[in-house]
Image: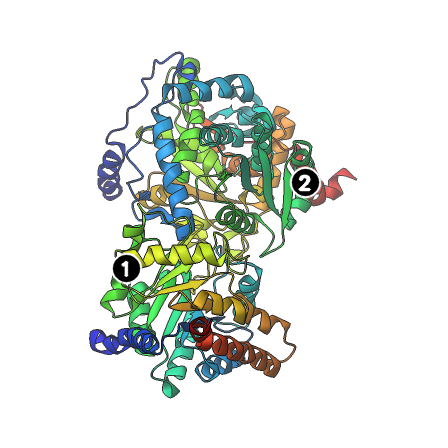
Amino acid sequence: MPDILSIFIPACLRYFEGIEIVPIAFEVVMNKPLNLSTSLPDGNGMFGSFGGRFVAETLMPLINELRDEYAAAKNDPEFQRQLTYFQNDYVGRPSPLYFAERLTEHFGGAKIYLKREELNHTGAHKINNCIGQVLLARQMGKKRIIAETGAGMHGVATATVAARFGLKCVIYMGTTDIERQQPNVFRMKLLGAEVVPVTSGTGTLKDAMNEALRDWVTNIDDTFYIIGTVAGPHPYPAMVRDFQAVIGHETRRQMQEKEGRLPDSLVACIGGGSNAMGLFHPFLADESVQMIGVEAGGKGVQSGLHAASLNGGTPGVLHGNRTYLLQNEDGQIVDAHSVSAGLDYPGIGPEHAWLHEQGRVEYVSATDDEALDAFQICCQQEGIIPALETAHALAEVAKRAPKLPREHLMVVNLSGRGDKDMMSVAHYLGDKFQ
Amino acid sequence: MNQANSTVGTKRLERCFTALQAQNRPALVSYLTAGDPDAETSQRLLDGLPEAGVDIIELGMPFSDPMADGPAIQKAALRALEGGQTQAKTLEMVRRFREENATTPIVLMGYYNPIFCYGVERFLTDAAKAGVDGLIVVDLPPEHDDELCQPATRHGIDFIRLATPTTDAKRLPTVLANASGFIYYVSVAGVTGAGAATPESIERAVADLKRHTQLPIGVGFGIRTPQQAATIGRFSDAVVVGSALVDCIEQASTADEAVARVHGLVRELSASVRSCREEEAVS
Ligand SMILES: Cc1ncc(COP(=O)(O)O)c(C=O)c1O
């Protein structure tokens, strides 16, 4: 333990050099410009040895332009005012921090709060980021938006903001995911987006991301690529984190109001890691706050059929950044497996890889079966149908909460709602509902 | 020790360009993916390239997620990986090629991850030993030169840089800073196998590059036919043909047919490239 601390504390101090911590008694934070400044990543987009800008030369000038544009927007009061306006009046922020009384009783331990990101417009946290990026796209004069999507929640959020701002929208989605997330495909089309089926690889999220990158290098002049998670080349991991950090900032204030103190632990599921990073980041400097990221364990990390990059992967370079990846010893990416399309990705955002190596955040995994169990408990105890992605976070709560004292304040990021998952869940639980 | 070995390697690319300059013709550069369609056929394809008229060989290291490649080369990578191709086997192909051929430069082309996982130092040592002359790594921009470019140069392996239509005057010095071997001008913003830019715009871009570097300029992406190769070869130091050759493999139903088709197209390209500047002198 002392060893870990002696490595961890100086690293954290370095990390927070230059960060302005939002004062705790900050009442009207949502109407103020968000403080988006941090000291990592470094100038090359690195979080320690992770991150970076591993892209083809064609894209370098584009991501550098985006970096500069975003750096300016961070300090532009007008941009921040617009961001706050759309977050409040269009997305519906702040999202409630809800005391889940029945879930707390059910598990009989920690006091469980749900951060209700599923109540946002379009039903997930994804739109927090999309609103930010579309404002940038508009500012840069881009006319065409592209995105990759797995569960379809990011695709729907992107199609939504593209419609709102009158921009053309193309969404890349793997054929496997199109099949298991039909309602979202329909929603995207209704919103005016073109949904391009991706057949390469396993037809899941990573293949959709490859195809979106191919589109981007081909359409360099008019196209803005809205990456949906804290991955990709610099500045995406930092930028998406900053747009999602509204989750953590609100949680901090709301917990202060309700309990008069900081939470003791934060739990979130991890696909690329954006909802987790959004919740965690504003608390990273608070030593007393424990953080747990839950990867998709699929059929179990031992089985090899999973999507747990930190628990079952090794460092490598994919999609513009160095991070932990599921790959063979020859550096070929292997397929991820998860019941949840949004977690079915063989990588993870580089900042998570860094936090993992620093030991600041604990990364665990939940299997398909555990997630499906937790999914049902949440439906039955709270009347909230969570996304299958979110159910992975709830599965960790099921393991952890019963062992904790009643005073322990646990926040779970309820990252999305589960309407989209009805077909998958019916398929898995079919027998029970005959 | 590497230094001594690799000096020979470095010289191979340099010597090749010097010799061709004397003949006043551009180099024909071919791209094939190592292990496509299978290990044995791939070796036959490789070994026969110089005889068919290739001056510089680009050999692709297959990667599961080739983000910068179009469908033809994506499929080639999949065929190779399904056949069990690995980084070690690709290096072994080069070593075997070098048993018979000591002059034709070989440039390995691909993505960073398979090299990173092999281990950069170990890879460079083994590549130099096998007789590799240069590397083209698509997803390593100059901002990450400390990862592989600089170590490669220390091993005497050239690091060939890509310049693209988006590389503007401000960025060009960064791109050229640690480049060696030659500069590969990617003539269209897009993936491999996509459409071609107009010869006029390519000629302008090549002239621009020549003002900033002494290195030879090769042009690739979108060059498929002997006619296109000749047009581009009039003003560039090298023309690169990839997807069109890879397509020959896909279209063939037997290994022999694949070899015949690939080497057949190479012969046509070679003839065209060899005479492209003569025609110009005549007309
Ligand atoms: C509801 C929900 N939660 C979580 C995720 C996983 O993404 P991330 O880890 O970036 O939050 C997704 C992705 O589609 C999602 O739809």
Residue B117 appears anywhere in the view: no
Q: Is residue B168 left or right of residue A1?
A: right
Q: Position of residue B207 (x, y in %)?
A: 35, 58
Q: Residue at x 47, y 62 (%)?
A: B63
Please say if the residues under marks 2 and 1 sit with CB atoms less than 8 Å apart. Answer: no
* Alpha-carbon span between mark 2 and mark 1: 60 Å
- Please state the chain letter of the residue tagged with numbered disc 2 in the rendered image: A
- Image quadrant where residue B151 sits: bottom left
Considering the numbered disc 1 on the image, is that residue within a helix, a strand or a loop?
Answer: loop
> Which residue in the structure is indicated by mark 2?
A425
Considering the numbered disc 2 on the image, is that residue within a helix, a strand or a loop?
Answer: helix
- Graded by Cα atoms within 10 Å as few (under 14), some (14 to 19) or many (20 or more), the crowding at tag 2 reads some
- Image quadrant where residue A193 sits: top right
To the question of a shared chain for discs 2 and 1, the answer is no
Q: How many marks?
A: 2
For residue B78, above or below residue A343: below
The quadrant the C terminus of chain A occupies is top right
Q: Position of residue B133 (x, y in %)?
A: 32, 73
Q: Residue at x 65, y 31 (%)?
A: A191
Q: Position of residue A320 (x, y in %)?
A: 41, 49
Q: Is residue A264 left or right of residue A424?
A: left
For the residues carrying marks 2 and 1, which lies nearer the camera in this image?
A: 1
> Which residue in the structure is indicated by mark 1?
B213
Q: Residue at x 31, y 51 (%)?
A: B172
Question: Looking at this view, is B197 or B67 the one in front?
Answer: B197
Residue B261 appears anywhere in the view: yes
Question: Looking at this view, is A235 or A428 the one in front?
Answer: A235
Q: Is residue A8 left or right of residue B207?
A: left
Question: Looking at this view, is A77 or A298 the one in front?
Answer: A77
The kind of residue on which mark 2 rests is Val
